[in-house]
Image (spheres, grey):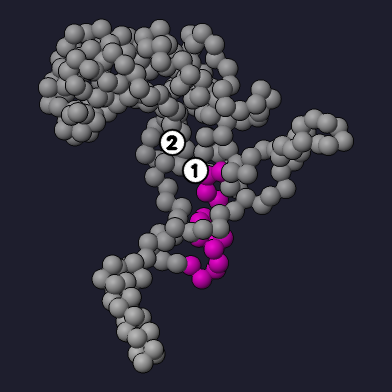
Amino acid sequence: MPMGTPALAAALKERLGDEIDLSGDPLNVMTLQVPLESWLETARVLRDDASMAFEQLTDLCGVDYLGFGIDEWETEDATREGFSRGVGALGPGRFRWRELPESQAAEQRFAVVIHLISFRHNWRLRVRTFASDEGFPVVPSLVEVWNSADWYEREAFDMFGIVFEGHPDLRRILTDYGFTGHPFRKDFPLIGNVTVRFDEEKRRVVYEPVEIEPRVLVPRVIREDSRYKADDIDQAAEDAADLDAAGAE
């Protein structure tokens, strides 16, 4: 199935005009960026206009651009300070989250992304919008346009704290009712806020402060040496076999 074509790009520009920002390769999945105030109206056009006819929403998710573009890993050279130093200690979700610098690549922090399919035209499309208020992100719900958005929006609300205005039943879907915070936000601690366990004496689940020190033990380092080259590995195996044969003689 071709995911994007020049014909789709032309149809989007002709129907939606200057209100959109279209990016990506027309031969792959294109990204259509829509202003928040046009989010719901554009969704209806994408579904109902015969020149596009995106009948199905296959996915909806939230995105947190906090720290976007910041490379916190030592990717080229291994460090001499141990595995726990393989990543910057002050990265997102570790220490001093409020002091983490804002992303320089995006003016707004929270976005909602959807993926659509047009079976009539054999097209796929990615659509994105940004919430205007970082402290209280609100985006119009798409449930009335594509009812498959229902649980996806609940998940984005639960994980990112994005409020979908007009959603018929906006409740947490993955975390507990009394859960604090939103786990997919970049400033959410990797170790969580509390420890949950079952207390045998009280015969119920109890919440306690986290005692684990947040750290990363496995650095991701790009290594380009003989251990990862297929020819050298095969040669090493042959050499080992020759040594075993010589020892047997």
Question: Most extreme residue toward the right, as rendered?
Answer: 201
The spot of residue 226 in percent (x, y) is: 32, 73
Q: Please give the name of the residue rendered at 80% of the width and 30% of the height, measured from the top-left corner.
A: 204
Queried whether the magenta region covers residue 150, the answer comes back as no
Q: Please give the name of the residue rendered at 76% of the width and 32% of the height, measured from the top-left corner.
A: 205
Q: Which amino acid does label 1 sit on?
A: Pro
Q: Which amino acid does label 2 sit on?
A: Tyr
Q: Is there any visible trace of residue 103 in the rendered image?
A: yes
76 or 227, which lies in front? Answer: 227
228, above or below 179, in the image: below
Question: Most extreme residue toward the bottom, as rendered?
Answer: 249
61, above or below 245, in the image: above
Bounds of the magenta segment? 79-93
Q: In this view, does 135 lie to the left or right of 202?
A: left
Q: How far apart are marks 2 and 1 (CA)?
A: 11 Å
156 or 108, which lies in front? Answer: 156
**Residue annotated with mark 1:** 101
Q: Which of marks 2 and 1 is nearer the N terminus?
A: 2
Q: In which quarter of the image is the N terminus?
A: top left
**Residue annotated with mark 2:** 65
The spot of residue 154 in percent (x, y) is: 51, 20
249, above or below 1, in the image: below
- The answer to which image quadrant residue 174 occupies is top right
107, above or below 17, in the image: below
Asked which secondary structure carries label 1, the reply is loop
The spot of residue 7 in percent (x, y) is: 12, 22
Q: Quadrant of the C terminus?
A: bottom left
Q: In this view, does 236 lie to the left or right of 199?
A: left
